[in-house]
Image (cartoon, grey):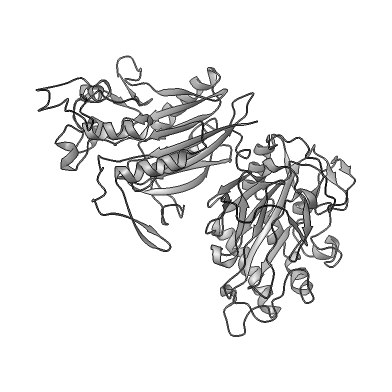
Amino acid sequence: MSVPVQVLSLTDLHGYLSETENLTLARPSGTLQVGGAAYLKAHLDQLRVGKPNSFLIGAGDQFSGWPDYTQAFANEPTIEVLNAFGMDFDVAGNHEFDREFPFLRRMQTGACYGKPGFDSCFKDSTGRNFHGTDYAYHAANIVDPRTKRPVLPPYWIAKAGSQRIGFIGLGFPGTPTETLSIDGSGFEFQGVVDAANRAAAELKAQGVNAIVVSMHEGGQQGGLYDECKNPTGPIFDAARAMSPDIDVILGGHWHTAFNCMIPDPNGVPRPVLEASNHGRVLREVNLSLDPKTGDVIRLAGDGYLFFRGLLPADVVGDVRERLARILYDSNWLAPGSEAAELIASERAVEEGSAGFFGAYTAIQSTEAFHQLAVRPELLSLTSRLLGEEAFAHAAHICRIAPPSPGANPTPIHQDYRFIQGCIDTLTTWLPLSAAPPEIGGLRVFAGSPRLGVLPVKASDGPGMMRAEADENHPEWRTTSYQPGDVLLFGSLTVHGAMPNRTKQLRLSADFRYQAVSAPMARDALGTGKPHYHPDVPDFPTLTRGWTSTDCIEIPAGVNFVDRWDPRVDDVPTPPSRFAYA
């Protein structure tokens, strides 16, 4: 079994401990009142339930509080609260240098200065003397200019089950020029990329293969706190340059919130996050470590990965416009409406029913739609996950979901019964139009691959089979999807669409990928025939006038195997590289 690891991130608390600070957080449904130590502790306790290897990682500027109730007591109440939170690791941000370096040392050791009980070393809330942090501060890029050695520990190696994980700290490079920071520290504040790469190489040399960077540097984006719209700033530049050995990058300093997937130098996306400020937001990343090597297996834990903005929105938008024009010309869209609005007409029908295949054939004839499946972002990602060269199955599926109740959503199911062949075939689900939950976006049952191959029963809707899984389990997950987002999951992950409760059509795409060396089922989706063939013509007809057919070709040497009846009850679960079972 893989080793689960939970990484929680808190940054720029600045001693805001009271729930009376009038802190808010903007959400799609309105503004939420947030903040306060009790609020954070309650959420931390809830998030940690069932997580044996959980780590709370800071990104700097937690103390040096501005509220009088912390500043008046030498910031010691903030340290008491962070200890109560179970903080495991923090970074020396710029405000950790608001006073001389020995002050930061004091915050860790509990040493007094001035008059105890007046200047420092106050009694805490339990009546005990201040004892300093239960954790350490780190910075790989703050060095002594004479020795070039870090003045704080550059990283921390933690035990996670049978494996280890490394956490690298990086201070803010511009600290010496910050208005509030002390002048003349005498230290050299280096760039974050070189320092992170040095520390990552040291960790790798010690056999630590799971690595998280926490840095007091950030950026901004144009969306809500859990989005990643047009991200800009130093953390994103650094994320594109830092070693691919680094698995997660946590940010701070900018007092912003984002949840991004940014490609590393090899083009493989990895999480890049910042948790706002003053305790408004906590960030959570769940990792799974290979029990033998300690490498991060990014798919094994929940059975899915979500990548916000992985694909260029303009590329996806171009495909959507082409398909919308086809649907408009096929009378699937309301008369007098704009094609881009995707307002459904009465002619819009459920997938596979009478009146469906005319428009669908035109969609399957659209080269730009098929080219999405072989975007380098998707091929690089799936190849990295599968550990070797991957290719896309030729049956590229476009889902056109009319409003309910006139059309049934795709029932919950596992792809393995339909795809067969290799258990480690991966599916990417791409929203081609905006897909908030009310329009029937996809939902996934987190952890469901561990259930093995589930029995099925007949059902309405695409596929005509429903997996026997709990529709109301608390681990069902979804989000508000935007064009450019990618949801990736394995063939044992239970998933399904939700009812479309709007007046619009929901457009999405399903693309499937497998390793070249893996077996592929004969006459299944992806053996060289288009989706819904023979109701849809074969590719020689569909591809007339295309500039290239590379996107629908299967590599030479793929081993084909026979199919079995997908409706049988007892299907053994084959072994998987993702350690699902």
Q: Position of residue 169 (x, y in %)?
A: 39, 29
Lateral position of residue 402 relative to residue 543, left or right: left
In the rendered view, tell whether residue 329 sits above or below residue 579: below
**In terms of image quadrants, where is residue 178?**
top left
Residue at the spot x=69%, y=79% of the render? Answer: 329
In the rendered view, tell whether residue 474 sits above or below residue 515: below
Lateral position of residue 281 relative to residue 343, left or right: left
Q: Nearer the viewer, residue 368 or 286?
A: 286
Lateral position of residue 28 relative to residue 561, left or right: left
Residue at the spot x=61%, y=34% of the render? Answer: 297
Q: Residue furthest front?
A: 126
- Residue 174 in view here: no
Q: Nearer the viewer, residue 461 or 570?
A: 570
Q: Position of residue 300 (x, y in %)?
A: 63, 38
Q: Position of residue 368 (x, y in %)?
A: 68, 61
- Residue 209 in view here: yes
Q: Nearer the viewer, residue 422 or 40?
A: 40
Q: Position of residue 232 (x, y in %)?
A: 41, 49
